[in-house]
Amino acid sequence: MLQQILQNHGYKALVALAGRVPSCVWEAAWHALDLMSTCRTPAAGFVRLRCETCGETKTIAFTCKSRLCPCCGWLAGQRLIETMQPRLIKCGYRHVVFSVPSELRELFFWERQLLPQACHAAAAATVECFQGLCKRYDLLPGIIGTCHTFGSDLHFHVHVHLLVTEGALQLGGVWQPVHYFPAGEFRRRWQYHLLTRLRQKLPADHPAQRTIGRLFRRYPTGFIVNLESRYRHVRQALQYCCRYLARPPLGEGRILAYDGRYVVFEHKDYKAGQLREKRCTAVSVVKLLLQHVLPRYARNIHYYGLYHPQTRRRWFDEVRRVSRYPQNVGGPATRALSWRERIIQAFKVDPVLCPGCGTAMVVDEVRWPAPRRAPPTHLPLGLPLTAGRAEAPARTVPFARSASARRAV
């Protein structure tokens, strides 16, 4: 249903978003919709199989592999779980959520290149809190982080998700379980690292510098950090977090009704602690979805501590040596299931076998998709499509757009 909504109202929403989102986001949304419009059709490319015994042919179309496509997003999430799980330490995990205050949301809305800095700041705060738990030795946990821009109601809300091992390696050579996460320390260190990194990355004359200085005094106890969620198994933790890394912000199960014009979807009201239904036009829903599309080639998952790619092998050998259960320490990455293996596992049917005689079919023809079109530079009416931070007229105010105007998007 979500794919149908995007195909029916995607272009109209793109026209409405022209100039109201950063140019990198608009171009990424255009490419995502262009890819999804040809998903599982011959226009996306196909492979034709032929049976050498009876001459039967079968055509299998390629998928779009877009993050906005619900089918391809679910498959990408499953592949991510399959490749990540063998490489992680099999222990308990704490799910830590770091919230960005509302005063900085406008800054992150227009400056999308700052989103990784929020993830780096959350990881630095976590490592420092672990080091404060042991005065004699430094503790090094395993951390996986991702930064999200969407909330349950699809409005722009920046927050960082971290999966942290409930244990750490002492640099003296001992694996130490950790079950105490000091909330006050996390809040203060998260505030310090986030604001310090933003102040260093932004130019000295940037209008947000003054806002960053006020936030140190406005929040004396730090920014909000949620430390309550715990997972006993690594697969349970990955299943929760990986589904947000590849699929669209709105899941298929949350869409309750669609009549061609209006969409009713379900979202969680965290203040009231209950589920609510929201009814709005389909174009509004698509506009809310497209403003969260990641810029092309942007990374959305980061590794720190024991999971850092450059030092992972050395630290994992040390963890395996000092662990009482070395079989619980992750090993090399495994190969994800192929398309044929996944079909056999799910439906108990081999898609390569001939439906007539049952013999294995061979590849007869492969048709690759045509080169992708470049995004247009102007609308049919002559209006420019892209508007970046530097082109915003209100450069002298703290942010380019007001919060009410962004919510109207």
Image (spheres, grey):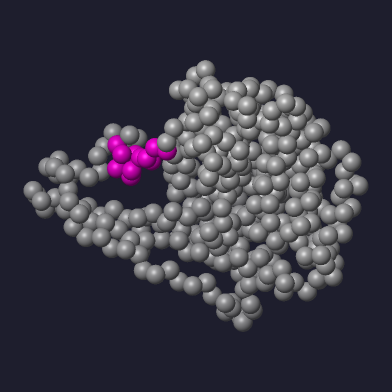
How many marks the image carries: the answer is: 0
Between 350 and 193, the one lying in front of the other is 193
In the rendered image, is residue 297 in sight?
Answer: yes
Farthest right residue?
A: 217
Q: Is residue 252 above or below residue 327?
A: below
Q: Nearer the viewer, residue 368 or 306?
A: 306
Q: Quadrant of the C terminus?
A: bottom right
Q: Quadrant of residue 260?
A: bottom right
Q: Quadrant of residue 370?
A: bottom left
Q: Seen in the image, is 25 located left or right of residue 130?
A: left
Q: Of 39 and 222, which appears nearest the observer?
A: 222
Q: Residue at x 51, y 60 (%)?
A: 32
Q: From the viewer's perspective, tell me whether residue 164 is left or right of residue 243.
A: right
In the image, what residue occupies the spot 67% across and 64% down?
A: 21
Give percent across and percent down for residue 108.
Answer: 72, 56
93 sits to left or right of 369: right
Residue at the spot 51% in from the left edge and 32% down from the top edge: 316
> In this rendering, is residue 206 above or below 180?
below
Q: Position of residue 201 (x, y in %)?
A: 73, 59
Q: Residue furthest bottom?
A: 382
| Residue occupying image coordinates x 25% and y 60% | 366
Reply yes or no: does residue 250 show up in magenta. Answer: no
Q: Quadrant of residue 172?
A: top right
Horizontal relation, residue 127 to residue 397: left or right: left
Residue 343 in magenta?
yes
**Which span is picked out in magenta?**
333-344
